[in-house]
Image: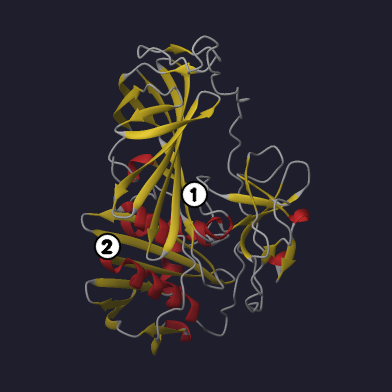
């Protein structure tokens, strides 16, 4: 199994990018609108539908509000997403067939749609810059210039100005000012083992660790549980880097807050995965004082834990998986965008130690409840933790958490699977 290049594309579209590129010259469009073009980009053509800018092998076509007015015709989109759907279909004569993502780091209601064509990435961004006023940028860029082009798109939208241009909120509602960045929210505790870290917001979620004492941990999300309790999603790499959980949450009432924690954005909670009560590991036999391993053909130990049959297993991944980078919301993408397929073969074998099995040459250790936990490397700095829970000697279900660092930012993805012997 291998991760494909499209993971980088998906993650870049979610990043809250660092400092934008240095600004270059200001250009003026029809209607008196202006835009600052980043250094390195050059206007190469201007025509009725907009202006074309290039930088190396990358290009950005800017469709100014007058061009967008002609494209939208008599339609009045309520937000940037609706405008993008109309404009994209008009420009390409085909509908959008994948997720439209919020565009970070701009005061406008702005979204972006991406697709891959041969060796290039197509990026179509639309922003609502005023009442019934829309702007679109249609970009083509090679894979190795994605970040630079995306940064240029954000800066160009951010700099757009004119007499009737106003900043808009993410839901499309108009405002007249752009708030200054709030002081980042962090949480901490003075005493060890006082604030439980859970895999989701709510005491019905699994607890996997405790918040370390006397350390300021970045808060990257907020959610309200079904019982009304408030929860912070915290930076996993700061709070518990050893954890295999995809994300970590802590109850607000259990921590001390620093910064503007009331302004933390609400994020979607991960789905609840039912927890099976874990029986104890198999006891030692009373006869010889040593463990009584299950037969290699599969079966059940004296303690009731299932032992898998040794041999080749067919594994099938879910059609969709959740992925996110640090500081971003989790999104769902087709699994085939990350892996070359969804069906794989694994060699699973038992050992003389009933608490250890071997999966494709890697050791997996018994965790209780018929579950074994192990990890493996994809290469190139990517790795994964894999939980396998056997429901019979010839059947299993599992969860794989993939970890990769992209341009210094930790990212992860979670996909569920089933297996048969």
Position of residue 312 measured from the top left corner of the image (x, y, whole percent): 28, 21
Q: Which mark is residue 143?
A: 2
The part of the image, by quadrant, that contains residue 304 is top right
Disc 2 is placed on an element classified as helix
Q: Is residue 17 above or below residue 245?
A: below
In the picture, measured across the screen, residue 269 lies left or right of residue 384, that is right
Residue displayed at 77% across by 48% down: 229
Position of residue 269 measured from the top left corner of the image (x, y, whole percent): 61, 46
In the picture, measured across the screen, residue 152 lies left or right of residue 43, that is right
Position of residue 81 measured from the top left corner of the image (x, y, whole percent): 50, 58
Q: Which mark is residue 331?
A: 1
Question: Disc 2 to disc 1, how far (Cα)?
Answer: 21 Å
Q: Is residue 55 visible?
A: yes
Q: Is residue 88 visible?
A: no
Disc 1 is placed on an element classified as strand
Residue displayed at 68% across by 63% down: 187
Quadrant the C terminus occupies: top left
Q: Is residue 347 above or below residue 256?
A: above
Q: Give the mark count.
A: 2
The part of the image, by quadrant, that contains residue 321 is top left
Q: Which mark is residue 59?
A: none
């Amino acid at each position: 199994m291998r991760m494909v290049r499209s993971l980088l594309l998906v993650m870049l579209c979610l990043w809250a990018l660092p400092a934008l590129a240095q600004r270059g010259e200001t250009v003026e469009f029809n209607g008196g609108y202006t835009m600052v073009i980043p250094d390195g980009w050059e206007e190469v053509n201007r025509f009725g539908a907009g202006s074309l800018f290039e930088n190396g092998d990358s290009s950005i076509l800017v469709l100014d509000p007058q061009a967008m007015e002609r494209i939208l015709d008599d339609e009045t989109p309520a937000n940037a997403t609706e405008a993008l759907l109309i404009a994209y279909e008009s420009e390409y004569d085909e509908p959008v067939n994948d997720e439209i993502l919020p565009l970070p780091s701009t005061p406008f209601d702005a979204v972006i749609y991406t697709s891959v064509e041969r060796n290039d990435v197509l990026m179509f961004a639309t922003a609502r810059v005023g009442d019934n006023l829309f702007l679109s940028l249609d970009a083509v860029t090679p894979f190795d210039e994605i970040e630079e082009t995306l940064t240029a798109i954000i800066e160009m939208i951010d700099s757009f100005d004119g007499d009737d241009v106003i900043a808009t909120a993410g839901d499309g509602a108009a405002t007249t000012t752009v708030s200054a960045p709030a002081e980042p929210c962090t949480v901490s505790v003075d005493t060890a083992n006082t604030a439980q870290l859970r895999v989701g917001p709510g005491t019905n979620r699994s607890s996997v660790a405790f918040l370390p004492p006397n350390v300021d941990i970045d808060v990257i999300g907020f959610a309200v549980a079904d019982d009304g309790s408030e929860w912070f999603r915290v930076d996993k790499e700061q709070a518990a880097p050893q954890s295999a959980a995809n994300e970590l949450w802590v109850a607000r009432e259990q921590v001390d807050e620093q910064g503007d924690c009331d302004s933390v954005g609400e994020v979607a909670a991960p789905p609840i995965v039912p927890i099976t009560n874990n029986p104890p590991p198999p006891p030692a036999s009373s006869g010889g004082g040593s463990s009584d391993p299950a037969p290699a053909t599969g079966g059940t130990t004296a303690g009731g834990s299932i032992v898998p049959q040794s041999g080749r297993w067919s594994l099938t991944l879910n059609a969709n998986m959740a992925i996110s980078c640090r500081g971003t919301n989790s999104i769902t993408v087709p699994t085939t965008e990350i892996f070359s397929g969804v069906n794989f073969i694994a060699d699973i074998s038992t050992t003389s130690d009933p608490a250890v099995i071997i999966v494709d040459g890697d050791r997996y250790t018994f965790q209780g409840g018929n579950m074994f936990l192990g990890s493996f490397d994809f290469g190139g700095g990517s790795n994964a933790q894999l939980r396998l829970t056997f429901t019979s000697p010839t059947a299993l279900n599992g969860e794989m958490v993939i970890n990769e660092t992209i341009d210094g930012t930790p990212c992860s993805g979670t996909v569920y699977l089933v297996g048969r012997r």
